[in-house]
Image (cartoon, helix red, strand yellow):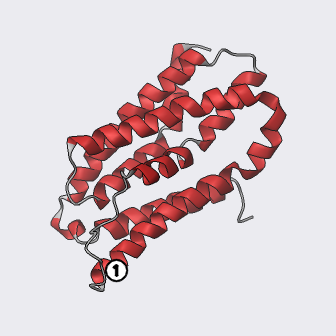
Amino acid sequence: MSFFTVFCLAVALSMDAFAVAVASACALCEVRCVHYVRLSASFGFFQFLMPVIGWLLGATVRSYVESWDHWIAFGLLAWVGGNMLWQAWKEFRGLADGEGKADPTSLRNLILLGIATSIDALAVGISFALLETPILWPSILIGIVCAAITALGVFLGRKLSGMSALESYASVIGGLTLLGIAVNILREHQVFG
């Protein structure tokens, strides 16, 4: 497989991570360098790891993964998005317990979001195994491209969250965006008919 083909695949696989990075940055009170590193490293790592796992699994679990991958991604994204909306609702109602906004870059959220945004990369790894294509260099390129695109998403989210009209509703926008991505995954897999 050519470099250009793998690069285009990497960009396509990174679009969910980009959207989640924008939503996560919008939900943060202040985006710092550590947030760039956490999100980019996490999403890049999972985009690297999942094709390798898929390749190792090969054809043995392909039908199982294909029939459930969208539900797993939906559940993970809906959980984190719902949690962001819950925290925003508590803030608006004055019920926040001093912990402030939910941090989308906490370890638990990074793991959930990293897996949710890279489920499709698992299927790509399975496809590579069926085509008997080596996986190491494509996975490295996919991870690097995803990390860069994620950083771009965090930057864009930071700019959007600085808009005064969006600032007070950033968690709501972020949560709704994640829920929208989750529902779109089901739509793409024709769950709604």
In percent of width and height, residue 52 lies at 62, 26
In percent of width and height, residue 66 lies at 75, 45
Above or below, comparing residue 73 to residue 54 in the picture: below
In percent of width and height, residue 156 lies at 27, 47
In percent of width and height, residue 90 lies at 34, 80
Above or below, comparing residue 92 to residue 144 in the picture: below
Q: Is residue 149 in sight in this rendering?
A: yes
- Which quarter of the figure has residue 139? top right
The crowding category of the residue bearing disc 1, from other C-alpha atoms within 10 Å (few below 14, some 14 to 19, many at least 20), is some
Above or below, comparing residue 62 to residue 3 in the picture: below
Above or below, comparing residue 131 to residue 46 in the picture: above
In percent of the image, x 23 and y 59: which residue is there?
161
In percent of the image, x 41 and y 44: which residue is there?
18
Number of numbered discs on residues: 1
Q: Is residue 188 in sight in this rendering?
A: no
Dot 1: what SS?
Answer: helix
Quadrant (top left, top right, bottom left, bottom right) of the C terminus: bottom right
Q: Which residue is mark 1?
A: 90
- Which quarter of the figure has residue 42? top left
In the displayed image of the protein, which residue is found farthest to the bottom? 93
Dot 1 amino acid type: Lys
- Which quarter of the figure has residue 149? top left
Quadrant (top left, top right, bottom left, bottom right) of the N terminus: top right
